[in-house]
Structures are given as C-alpha cells and as structure tokens.
Image: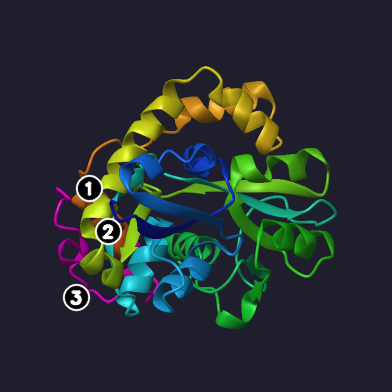
Amino acid sequence: MKTKHSLRVGGVPEHFNLPWQLAAERDVFSNYGIDLSWTMYAGGTGAMTQAISNGSLDIAVLLTEGFIAAASDGLEASIAKVYIDTPLVWGIYSGAQSSIQEVDTFRNKRIAISRFGSGSHLMSMIHASERHEQIEENQFEIVNSLHGGVNALVQSHADLFYWEKFMTRPHVQSGDVKSVGEFSAPWSSFLIIVGNKVMREKQEAVKRLLEIMNVECITFKQDVHSAIHLSKRFDMTLPEARQWLQHTQWNYNFEVSSVSLENAKSALVSVNKCLPTLELRKLCAPWVLI
C-alpha cells in the first residue's frame, strides 16, 4: 500500500483561504497520497510562525511582510510559492464613538495588534514610517484577533486597528467601529511557507500539494458559486463577495516577483524589522522561479 504523507497546513480564518477549506472538506488530497489537516489560526501570521518554529505546523499561508520579518528573526522556513498576487488592502479603524476621523498622526495613539510580528503590527509601523513618524512599542495593545481588535476599539482600550477591509466591513456596518483610512503596500499579499525540516523530509509531497492547490484556486476563481460560498461563510453580501472576487487574484504557478519581495523587505528594513543582509533568493524552494 502506498504511504500517505501527513501535512499540517494553517491559515487565517478569512476568505482568501476558502479554496483550502473547500478542498479539505472534499478531501481532494487523499487520492494523491496526502493526509492533510487544515487549521485556522485566528492569531494570524505571528501565531503561525511560532507554530512552524515549534514544529506543530508544517505549511502556512502567511502575509509576505510577516514571513520576511520572521525569516530575518531566524525562522527556518522556505517560500514555496506566492498564494495571492494582489496586494492586501488594509482598512484602518477606530471606535464608532471615537473623535478620530482620519489618521493624521500616530502620536499618543494606542494601536491594537493581533500580536507582535503580525500584519496588523508591521503594517501600522510601515504606514507610520511612510509618514515620517515612529510608533513606540508601548503604544501597541495585543488583542489576538479581529474580534479582539474590534472589542478593544469599542471599549476604548485602543485608538486604531489595521485589518483587511472586507473582513472588517460587517463591524463597520453594525456601527461598532468606523473606517478612518486605508493603506495598501506594493507587494503580493500572501505566500505559502514550508518549514525547512518538512521541506527536507517531504519535498515531493509538498510540491504535489501545491500543484493540487493551483488547480483548486483556478476552479474557485472561475466557479460562479464561489461568491455564494463566500457570502454564507464570511458575512458578506453577494455584491460584496463578487466585488472581492473580482479584485483578488490567486497565483497559479511557481513564479515569485523579486521586485515584490524586495519592496516588502525594504519597507521592513525601514522600521528595523528586517536585516538589510537577508538574502531572499536563498529562502525560496528549489522549484520557485524568481
């Protein structure tokens, strides 16, 4: 009997990862000798990089900037492919009763973040840097998740919170929080990352898994029912789901833009979250074309 390879994959509980969820629910991997377990990480990139480090996770769908920062900090993992080509649009939020109407300054503002090293942490720092400001560490409030961030704003424990705008939209519509701005960075939003130990021991199975997911993502993008799945699972209206699908592009090959990666690295270097000497090419899997 052919040996099955167990692979533990994780991602945030957001619409980007619905192709993974649907594929796992249909168990499309078994026929290819893969025993896949899919786990949602509400704690985001920081939680997943920690899980890869301690060996409890094999593969993760991570924010590009989160992975580069973690790699610079010693994470032993490789870029297996780009997952989402399009940049992530971060909404910036404050409590509905807050006097803040726009992000005019970060001075004396308390910033909610899911955890240190997360996208909500890094993007607020990068945004501040672009505005020639600096956020001090004591300004950050750790809230663990989207819901933690919303609660922190509602209870006035934080002043600002960065999160993907479509996922946060229901909380704006409910009147709990308000949008005070947006910020988007010039690089692909999500990468698929594999722990180096797994890459050494199960390289063939990992590549096979990624090839399967390329097909799954193409099917999801083209399927007229995908918007319905999104609206049911993520509290989106059908028009919102269709709009989000139209503006989101999954990656279907193994090409990685060096310009995109270098843009993210440069932004992280500017906020002292990445070493200038980090060589991104050396972090790529053997099949990656960069």
Residue lying at 54% horizontally and 54% vertically, measured from the top left: 12
Residue lying at 37% horizontally and 64% vertically, measured from the top left: 67
Residue, far front = 1
Residue, far top = 224
For disc 3, the marked residue is: 277
Q: As rendered, which of 12 and 256 lies closer to the eye?
A: 12
Q: Position of residue 148 (x, y in %)?
A: 72, 63
Q: As rendered, which of 27 and 125 lies closer to the eye?
A: 27
Three-letter amino acid code of the residue under disc 3: Thr
Q: Position of residue 183 (x, y in %)?
A: 51, 49
Mark 1 vs mark 2: which is more N-terminal?
2
> Which of the two discs, 3 and 1, sits closer to the camera?
1
Query: What whole-number distance in Å separates the C-alpha atoms at marks 1 and 2?
Result: 9 Å
> Which of the two discs, 3 and 2, sits closer to the camera?
2
For disc 2, the marked residue is: 79
Query: What whole-number distance in Å separates the C-alpha atoms at marks 3 and 1?
Result: 19 Å
How many numbered marks does the figure carry? 3
Query: What whole-number distance in Å separates the C-alpha atoms at marks 3 and 2?
Result: 17 Å
- Look at the image and give the residue range highlighted in magenta: 267-290
> Image quadrant of residue 72?
bottom left
For disc 1, the marked residue is: 256
Residue lying at 75% horizontally and 57% vertically, measured from the top left: 150
Colour pattern of the rendering: rainbow
- Relative placement, left or right, of 219 versus 210 is right
Q: Are marks 1 and 2 in contact (CB under 8 Å)?
A: yes
